[in-house]
Amino acid sequence: DCVGWNVNAGNTFEMGYEMNNNVSDVSWTDIYSIHSGTRGVWRRGAVTIHQSAGGTVRNVTYNNVHIEDPKEYAFHFAILKTEYGIGDGVVWSPGKVENVTFNNVYVYHDAPEGSEMWGYSEENCFENITFNNLYFNGKKVTSFEEADFRRVENIKNVQFK
């Protein structure tokens, strides 16, 4: 039950970046991103998971998501190495994201940068991703292409229903 308006920095509804421990059983319900980011190349999105540390993110559910005015990305999901710190003395290693479900998601306007989902490697990847009732501009979509995902790499077991 949250409305987000994001302007100059960060992401509207974000998981990341410095999750060096495991994170599990997260639920986002009835979230409205009415404006997200500024036009640029900073991976700013309305709904994001940015895993740039060694933990595993698992069992994440998004229910009833509305994205109205994305200025960069509608969705940006990545496992990556960044300049963000993960703690003194911690040695960086890539993480993993698994078991993410999207239920009843509506994107009302095209995002200039589209959307992205990419893992760091075949082993450090996004796995078991399900989209139930994903709509772009009023049309139900059943593929990454129809949903304007412009980069999709190191993803395993994705379903559009």
Image: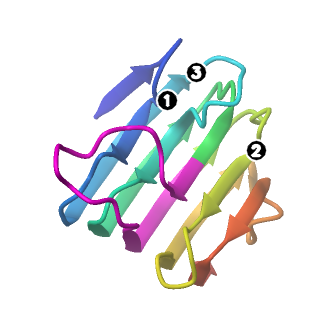
Q: Is residue 105 above or below residue 126?
A: above
* Residue matched to label 1: 33
- Magenta range is 76-105
Of callouts 2 and 3, which one flags the residue occurring earlier in the amino acid sequence? Answer: 3
- Frontmost of labels 1 and 2 is 2
Q: Which x, y percent locates residue 63? A: 39, 55
* Residue matched to label 3: 37
Q: Secondary structure at mark 1?
A: strand
**What kind of residue is marked 1?**
Ser
Question: Which is more toward the observer, 3 or 72?
Answer: 72
Q: Is residue 116 above or below residue 61?
A: above
Q: Is residue 132 above or below residue 31?
A: below
Circle on res. 116: none
Q: Which x, y percent locates residue 151? A: 75, 59
> Residues under labels 2 and 3: Cα distance?
13 Å
Of callouts 1 and 2, which one flags the residue occurring earlier in the amino acid sequence? Answer: 1
> Residues under labels 3 and 1: Cα distance?
10 Å
* 82 in magenta: yes
Q: Secondary structure at mark 2?
A: loop
